[in-house]
Amino acid sequence: MKIEKICCIGAGYVGGPTMAVIAAKNPNIKVTVVDLNEERIAAWNDDDLNNLPIFEPGLDMVVKEVKNKNLFFSTDIEGAIDEAQMIFISVNTPTKTYGKGKGMAADLKYIELCARQIAAVSKQNKIVVEKSTLPVRTAEAIKTILNNTGSDVDFQILSNPEFLAEGTAIQDLFNPDRVLIGGDNSDEGMKAIDALVNIYSSWVPKEKILTTNVWSSELSKLTANAFLAQRISSINAISELCEVTGADVTEVSKAIGMDSRIGSKFLKASVGFGGSCFQKDILNLVYIARSYGLTEVANYWEQVILLNDHQKNRFVDLIVNTLFNTVSGKKVAFLGWAFKKDTNDTRESAAIYVADGLLDEEAMVVVYDPKVKESKILDDLNYLQTRSGSENDSLLSVKSDPYEACKNVHAIAILTEWDEFKTYDWQKLYDNMYKPAFVFDGRSILNKEQLEKIGFKYYAVGASNL
Ligand code: UDX
Ligand code: UDX
């Protein structure tokens, strides 16, 4: 099938950047990204590129190059589905908050909604590509819905999981380690796989495009995220041991990372991993394993999440214990709220849970993040439903200037590894704080010696405080 028009349902962190790059690399294909959220589409269509709904380094330049040439953003979902030969599904699949599998399984209601919409609108054969991370065998459900429409339209379902990391999405899309495409072994299935391979091969070397069956592809995505998260929980477990034994986790990471079998990436101890994928995908893996009766497998992976929760709680305890066992009425400044640097995404950010833990201890929290909006920060906290919105409002405030945020506080906590934090005038920050002045570095980005010379009491995750 010759692909001339692509539709992508979901204009989020995955759909937006991925389609921008596909459009840039395939100027002869018209790519339309649709979304239910009118505000989000309006932001994508805003002439001022500073107003794009997501912040991602380099994204503005790619969007500028192709928007309204062969990349379009629209709320006309049906129109875009109707005209496209290939439809990507890139909607969110949050963890279920109700019913069976609550807190564990992926909520597939949006995916099902998309499948039903595609089924209702389509008049000609289409290739449907799962881009969202999904539980293994979701393609089967999509297929059943699509193939029971009563029409003779043929649908091929492919799984094409996204491996981009936020903050480096454009780089990852331009230069992927691999592109994974899962499809049916039938003639029609192979043709659909070829059609998608052709789109990627306009910039990705053929040897990096891997084709598998659908289930392997779906499971590979969950497995990749589980392995990555597991490395972080492993090093975070060691960080706790370092703190009590006098070892330093950055030295341990370096030493083990130089073993080429282990490798140096993803060995940075931190206040805990966040992001929309790791926790959700592992919970999903645990749920699937448990539903097949594989208790040991489920428990093994669940531990990655439990250790991550422990790491966030431990950071709260460190702050409270160090501030003489009480933070009631004390002010703690947060530098960073995003789940990692170079993104305005805050989903599952450790900062949310650390703030919640400190507010439970009656601390006041003042937040500065270079890219996250005030309303988002308060929404994140209110979403936990630990206390009322007005209580959160009175205990947590947001400043647009870091020096303002750190004025008259007892401690500064680093929650995100934004580069700019390293360039601040730390002497000035120190001068405006209560003494003794503490820094709790949840990302180990600052220079201990330098800060201690100024007079700070400095604590980093995994550093010996003996
Ligand atoms: C999401 C998932 O989090 C991830 O697991 C998956 O791999 C890809 O999709 P992301 O793009 O980061 O990732 O999510 P988000 O930024 O929330 O974007 C999803 C978009 O889909 C939202 O803009 C939402 O409005 C839209 N949507 C959702 C629809 O257009 N239709 C729906 O039925 C549901
Ligand atoms: C992840 C996967 O990397 C990506 O392939 C997949 O498509 C989506 O999920 P993302 O969540 O965007 O990407 O960012 P990632 O760089 O993986 O970071 C996840 C979290 O782990 C962040 O909170 C980050 O700060 C933390 N992290 C990462 C550490 O604490 N230590 C590390 O060594 C690496």
Image (cartoon, rainbow, N blue to C red):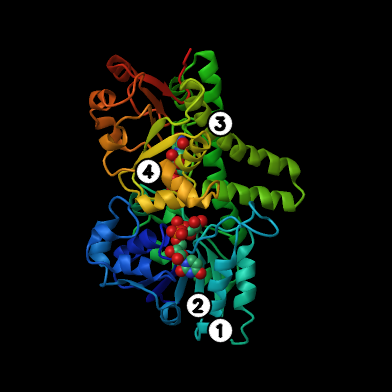
**Measuring 60% from the left and 53% from the top, which residue is drawn there?**
219
Residue under numbered circle 1: 153
Amino acid type of disc 2?
A: Lys
**Measuring 54% from the left and 49% from the top, which residue is drawn there?**
384
Does residue 173 appear in this view? Answer: yes
**Distance in Å between CA atoms under marks 3 and 4:** 34 Å
The percent position of residue 368, horizontal first and vertical second, equals 33, 41
Instruction: Tell me: 325 left or right of 369.
Output: right
**Dot 2 and dot 3 residues touching (CB under 8 Å):** no
The earlier-in-sequence mark between 3 and 4 is 3
**Distance in Å between CA atoms under marks 2 and 3:** 44 Å
The percent position of residue 373, horizontal first and vertical second, equals 34, 51
Residue under numbered circle 3: 234
**Dot 3 and dot 4 residues touching (CB under 8 Å):** no
The earlier-in-sequence mark between 2 and 1 is 2
Q: Badge 2 local density, few (<14 within 10 Å), some, or many (20+)?
A: many
Please tell me whether residue 230 is drawn above or below residue 11 in the rendered image.
above
Please tell me whether residue 217 is drawn above or below residue 414 in the rendered image.
below
Q: Secondary structure at mark 3?
A: helix
Residue under numbered circle 4: 397
**Distance in Å between CA atoms under marks 4 and 1:** 55 Å
The earlier-in-sequence mark between 2 and 3 is 2
**Tag of residue 126:** 2
| Front-most of residues 1 and 311 | 311
The earlier-in-sequence mark between 2 and 4 is 2
Quarter of the image with the N terminus is bottom left
Establish whether ligand 2 lies closer than 8 Å to the Cβ of label 4: no
Q: Secondary structure at mark 2?
A: strand
Amino acid type of disc 1?
A: Val
Which marked residue is nearer to the observer: mark 2 or mark 3? 3
**Distance in Å between CA atoms under marks 2 and 4:** 50 Å
